[in-house]
Image (cartoon, grey):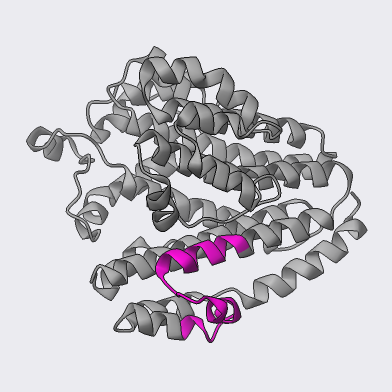
């Protein structure tokens, strides 16, 4: 698409972005006394009309409503594009549906009854996953039957192919990783077909997202055999070589990152984040187990690592990356991609704030979980 072709889409995105909550508004939301007060404040924002329509404005229903709104924004933006950019954004949209599939797969694997799934998961629909298909997924007797309900969608082939490995491992991660790999490979292929300018922008955005997902996966899987861990990595390499992921798997503690890892595209970023890792971990509003960054702390504590502090820090890095798309020339595919990423991040912030407020967490601790 030419620069002029993006004019309509940019105008639409400009209007949508003007409604999004500012950091100041998010902080005001966090500082009120109760969930009810938070919902009252939200009713004064662009999501207020939809919240008012809910018969039961529970956190679960608000979450489902927000993601339904996001799916509608995907539809509107995809509709306004043509040719290769439309194909890329359409495959990006399928990733949103993939999150629904993965969530229900995990619940089905755990043996959660259909009525409990309906009452515990924020159901929302996409073009590929209308209400009737989602209901069939929820009603399926087991994971294998659930996969069969997805025939006719892009999700069916990778999941059905992974069923034998799932049966052997008895882990839903086998299926969710297979689906992620398929969706990202398809998206990466569509990016390769873009024109020069769009391809450079999209490769940088999607490539870095894949890189950091793989890095996080490697940190979560530390101590796992390399051949086992391989199945959980997205098979696309941008700036992270496979030997880097293998080296991360072998780290006994995070303090070794400076001495045991080969230099790679994110060495300085990871090193900078780890400087504040221990302090951030202690400040999070959970009595979580986490992997100490320093060798000294590691000698006192070696346990199953939570990488939530690192995940939050990397998400903040990605937010800053996507915000740059709105500076300077905006006539490229990075603008719609960035908007949808930031909208989803906004939803995650709102729902995190609501859930932590319901749990009685103090405002200052909730703010540490926010990603701006």
Where is residue 3 shown, x and y percent of the image? 88, 56
Q: Residue at x 34, y 23 (%)?
A: 249
Q: Residue at x 31, y 45 (%)?
A: 274
Where is residue 245 shown, x and y percent of the image? 42, 24
Determine whether 129 is above or below 189 in the image: below
Determine whether 222 is above or below 316 in the image: above
Where is residue 238 shown, x and y percent of the image? 60, 30
Where is residue 224 shown, x and y percent of the image? 31, 20
The mark tally for this picture is: 0
Residue situated furthest left in the rendering: 300
Query: In the picture, residue 30 is in which quadrant?
Result: bottom left
Left of 128 or right of it: where is 357?
Answer: left
Q: Residue at x 57, y 22 (%)?
A: 160
Q: Which residues are the magenta region?
A: 41-68
Magenta: predominant secondary structure element? helix
- Frontmost residue, 32 versus 364: 32
- Frontmost residue, 103 versus 11: 103
Left of 131 or right of it: where is 247?
Answer: left
- Frontmost residue, 267 versus 98: 98
Determine whether 150 is above or below 160 in the image: below
Would you say residue 24 is visible in this rendering?
yes
Would you say residue 177 is visible in this rendering?
no
Left of 162 or right of it: where is 86?
Answer: right
Query: In the picture, residue 338 is in which quadrant?
Result: bottom right
Residue 49 in the magenta stretch? The answer is yes
- Frontmost residue, 278 versus 21: 21
Determine whether 21 is above or below 220 in the image: below
Q: Residue at x 20, y 49 (%)?
A: 288
């Amino acid at each position: 698409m030419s620069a002029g072709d993006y004019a309509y889409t940019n105008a639409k995105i400009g209007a949508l972005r003007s409604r999004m909550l500012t950091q100041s508004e998010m902080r005001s939301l966090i500082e009120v006394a109760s969930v009810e007060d938070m919902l009252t404040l939200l009713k004064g924002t662009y999501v207020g009309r939809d919240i008012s329509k809910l018969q039961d404005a529970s956190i679960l229903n608000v979450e489902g409503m927000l993601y339904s709104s996001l799916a509608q924004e995907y539809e509107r933006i995809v509709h306004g594009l043509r040719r290769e950019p439309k194909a890329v954004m359409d495959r990006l949209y399928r990733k949103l549906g993939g999150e629904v599939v993965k969530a229900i797969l995990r619940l089905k694997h755990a043996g959660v009854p259909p009525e409990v799934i309906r009452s515990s998961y924020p159901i929302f629909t996409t073009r590929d996953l209308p209400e009737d298909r989602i209901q069939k997924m929820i009603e399926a007797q087991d994971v294998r039957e659930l996969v069969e309900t997805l025939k006719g969608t892009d999700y069916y082939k990778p999941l059905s192919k992974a069923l034998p490995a799932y049966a052997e491992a008895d882990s839903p991660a086998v299926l969710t990783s297979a689906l992620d790999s398929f969706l990202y490979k398809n998206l990466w292929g569509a990016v390769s077909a873009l024109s020069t300018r769009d391809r450079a922008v999209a490769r940088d955005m999607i490539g870095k997202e894949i890189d950091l997902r793989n890095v996080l996966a490697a940190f979560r899987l530390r101590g796992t055999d390399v051949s086992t861990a391989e199945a959980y990595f997205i098979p696309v390499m941008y700036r992270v070589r496979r030997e880097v992921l293998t080296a991360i798997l072998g780290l006994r503690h995070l303090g070794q990152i400076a001495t045991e890892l080969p230099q790679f595209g994110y060495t300085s970023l990871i090193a900078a984040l780890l400087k504040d890792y221990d302090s951030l971990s202690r400040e999070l509003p959970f009595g979580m187990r986490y992997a100490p960054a320093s060798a000294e702390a590691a000698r006192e504590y070696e346990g199953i690592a939570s990488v939530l502090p690192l995940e939050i820090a990397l998400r903040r890095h990605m937010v800053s990356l996507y915000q740059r798309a709105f500076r300077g020339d905006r006539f490229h595919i990075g603008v719609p991609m960035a908007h949808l990423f930031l909208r989803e991040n906004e939803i995650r912030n709102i729902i995190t704030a609501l859930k932590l407020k319901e749990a009685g967490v103090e405002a200052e601790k909730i703010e540490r979980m926010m990603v701006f």
